[in-house]
Image: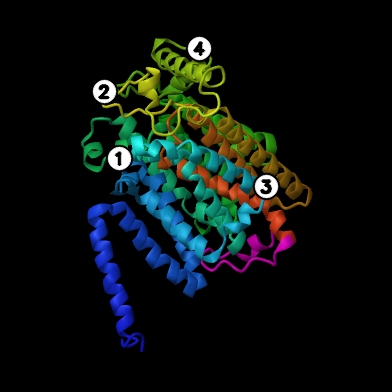
Amino acid sequence: MILGLGRRTVPLLLGAVAAVGLGAGVIWSPAAVVGATAALLVIPSCLARKDLAEKWTWWPLLVVLWGYAFGGRTFAGIGYGPVYVGELALGVTLCAAGATGTLRRPLGSFIGKLLLAFMIWCAVRTVPFLPAYGTAALRDAAIWGYGLFALVTAGAILHYGSLFSVVRLYGRAIWVFLLWLLLVGYVRVLTPSAAVGKVFWLGGLLKPGDVSVHLAGVASFLLLGLHRHGSANLRGGWIQEWLLWPIWLLSFLLSASQNRGGLLSVLVSLSVVLALWRRGGWGKLAVATLCLLMAFTFLELDVDVGAPRKASPQQIVVNLLSLSGGAGSVNEGTRQWRLGWWRKIWGYTVQGDYFWGGKGFGRNLADEDGFQTDSAHSLRSPHNGHLTILARSGVPGFTLWLLLQICLWLGLLRRYSGAARAKQTRRAALIVWLLAYLAAFSVNSAFDVYLEGPQGGIWFWVMFGVGVSIVAEAHWKRTQAPAPHCALLPQTAHLRAV
């Protein structure tokens, strides 16, 4: 008995009070109610059962990652502003990580502390603008706020020992993913006014740059031979590999011909693989590319998509030349618009009055800098995520950002070198794939508003978190006992042996 109430009455009374409180809170702040409900559901279950904590961590991550990869902007719009599906997944995973204490693992490493310092500095440049700009400041802060996904991901991998399960899960989705990207590219580029595009909204799901980043990841995955390990769908042999490359090349043609940043992201990603991995399946890619070029040449294919840029190999060459100013007027206009804005940001930060703090997170940079192109004022940041950080957080924030990227790359290269010397082929291949994927993210974000949104930001920070787990792994091996077996993402025997 508690205050004269039975044991069964107390939980019912507490539940009733919580229900009334949440119901009243909906009127005041629906977003706060969503967060409180998630916390009430996740934290007690994680404290009661550790296996549920693991599921509350991984399943939200998997849902949002593949949701953004397949659904893009359409999937990102699920929710009630300012809490959308990405923010809800972040809240759930943070509750699970907080209940189990997994965040202390990545935060104990140097790279984790550097990430925390970067986020703290950006938070300092966000909080003062909340009263004036409200949700707009939170929206701008997503580029660094999603860094929490990196800490959650790294902590989960270090705690549950599920690093190599990433290979198996990614490999299983390659076939479906490539076919989906080809379908989206076809509807968007070849039939922009077709009825199917209007009915299913396929044409507006993914931007060409977003598609190119994931095509870079898939190509690197195949070249490194990771699809041969832990992926039941690709164990059919060499025939399936030969079928994958033509599908990849057609998707690449449809996306790279429409977006210079996406094209460069694929080329840089493949260059990383070529520099670090000489034994991959380059022959299949070369033969498939040669066949595609011969088909376009002898059949005189030059697809007019009703836009200034055509879907053809020649257009890809024009896009490459435009990067250095050697293309025609179609690409030159957007190139000069970007360069003009970037020079202005460099001027008022590195050489101007906004050196220390930037303009903060909340102000519309396109309006203030005089480069707005949308009558609805929807454009808020320059088409360069790196310079967005410079413009909003100043030189100190930009320096922390650069140090964060450099330290992660150096740490991963060091782990790659160690794995290569120890003949740990799969581990070395996984690190190279991660480096190639991160390179694609960084390059595409230099040409588009990519890291600022959930489609690119969450994917980037989750992959960044995988890298943090690899770099921080040695520290925790020296101080902790072996990690428990991952039940949700089981590692096969040949992967555990790596």
Name which residue type carries label 3: Phe
Instruction: Indicate which disc residue 325 carries.
Output: 4
x%, y% of residue 481?
70, 67
Q: Secondary structure at mark 2?
A: loop
Instruction: Indicate which disc residue 98 carries.
Output: none
Q: Which residue is mark 1?
A: 202
Distance between mark 3 and mark 1 Cα atoms? 43 Å
Distance between mark 1 and mark 4 Cα atoms? 33 Å
Mark closest to the chain's N terminus, 4 or 3? 3
Instruction: Indicate which disc residue 375 carries.
Output: 2
269 or 287, nearer to the observer: 269
Q: Quadrant of residue 328?
A: top left
Q: Quadrant of residue 44?
A: bottom left
Q: Quadrant of the N terminus?
A: bottom left
Q: Is residue 307 above or below residue 1?
A: above
Give the extent of the magenta segment: 479-498
Distance between mark 1 and mark 2 Cα atoms? 25 Å
Name which residue type carries label 1: Leu
Mark closest to the chain's N terminus, 3 or 1? 3
Circle 4: is it few (<14), some (14-19), or many (20+) Cα within 10 Å? some
Q: Quadrant of the C terminus?
A: bottom right
Name which residue type carries label 2: Ser
408 or 214, nearer to the observer: 408
Mark closest to the chain's N terminus, 1 or 4? 1
Name which residue type carries label 4: Gly
Q: Which residue is mark 3?
A: 110
Residue depth check, mark 1 versus mark 2: number of the one nearer the observer: 2
x%, y% of residue 454?
41, 42
